[in-house]
């Protein structure tokens, strides 16, 4: 958890001051964009769209509620609601231009990556811990697709992974504390 905060802080600072790490990030991105067919990178990046990720989480929440885990489903919903509440102000504050659209601003951090991470890991936590590797693959594919297509810089994706980790940690911490309280009282 500590490292997620450190990485998020350092990457944000480097983006704000356009430091050496941000400049390296931009050079790396230029060498990666369009190294795979655009259709493939676009399909991969679509895994972070709300229209793809949210139905997965909603189905898992419905399953959890049906299984009597309504509070866990609520915490998953709150975790997803936290994504835009945290990502949008960071985008506004950093005003980072995009890899393929230098005139546009608001690319750091990647909302698609954070959405994918919170939705897919949240769904895995609600349905079965055995699905965590699937959530990891879906999140990695979404983030990689965003970089390879040129929709985001690598640091945008890295920062979102750290932010997603923090959101999931808080959500999971609340689920565990609520579950342990219920068991000890019942």
Image (cartoon, rainbow, N blue to C red):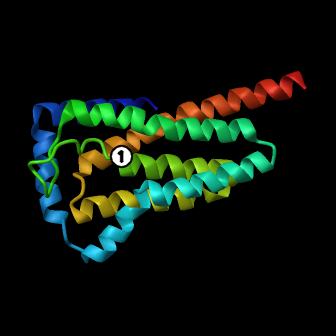
Instruction: Give the residue at the far right of this rendering.
Output: 186
Would residue 3 be visible to someone looking at this image?
Answer: no
Q: Regarding mark 1 in the picture, which secondary structure is present there?
A: helix
- Residue 14, quarter of picture: top left
Q: Position of residue 12 (x, y in %)?
A: 24, 33
Q: Residues within 10 Å of mark 1 (few under 14, many from 20)?
A: many
Hey, which residue is sitting farthest front in the picture?
51
Please tell me which residue is depicted at 14% across the width and 58% down the height of the picture: 100
Res. 40 image quadrant: bottom left
Which residue is at the front of the view, 157 or 42? 42
Q: Residue at x 16, y 32 (%)?
A: 16
As drawn, 181 above or below 108: above
Q: Taking 10 as reference, is 134 above or below it? A: below
Residue in the foreground of this view, choosing between 41 and 81: 81
Q: Nearer the viewer, residue 111 or 50?
A: 50
The percent coordinates of residue 164 (x first, y second) are 44, 41
Q: Nearer the viewer, residue 109 or 169?
A: 109
Left or right, 153 with reference to 142: left
- Which residue is found at the position 20% from the left and 33% from the top? 94
**Residue appearing at x 25%, y 51% in the figure:** 154
Which corner quadrant of the image does residue 71 belong to?
top right
For the C terminus, give its image quadrant: top right
Question: To which residue does mark 1 refer?
Answer: 111
Res. 171 visible in picture = yes
Position of residue 179 relative to residue 134, above or below, is: above
């Amino acid at each position: 958890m500590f490292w997620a905060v450190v990485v998020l802080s350092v990457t944000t600072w480097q983006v704000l001051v356009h430091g050496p790490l941000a400049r390296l990030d931009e050079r790396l991105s230029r060498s990666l964009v369009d190294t795979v067919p655009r259709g493939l990178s676009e399909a991969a990046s679509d895994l972070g769209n709300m229209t793809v990720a949210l139905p997965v989480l909603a189905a898992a929440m419905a399953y959890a509620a049906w299984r009597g885990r309504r509070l866990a489903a609520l915490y998953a919903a709150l975790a997803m609601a936290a994504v835009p509440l945290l990502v949008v102000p960071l985008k506004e504050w950093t005003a980072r231009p995009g890899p393929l659209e230098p005139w546009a601003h608001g690319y750091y951090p990647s909302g698609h990556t954070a959405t994918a991470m919170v939705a897919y890991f949240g769904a895995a936590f609600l349905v079965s811990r055995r699905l965590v590797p699937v959530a990891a693959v879906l999140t990695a594919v979404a983030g990689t697709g965003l970089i390879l297509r040129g929709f985001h810089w690598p640091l945008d994706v890295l920062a979102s992974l750290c932010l997603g980790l923090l959101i999931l940690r808080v959500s999971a911490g609340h689920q565990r504390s609520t579950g342990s309280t219920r068991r000890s009282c019942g």
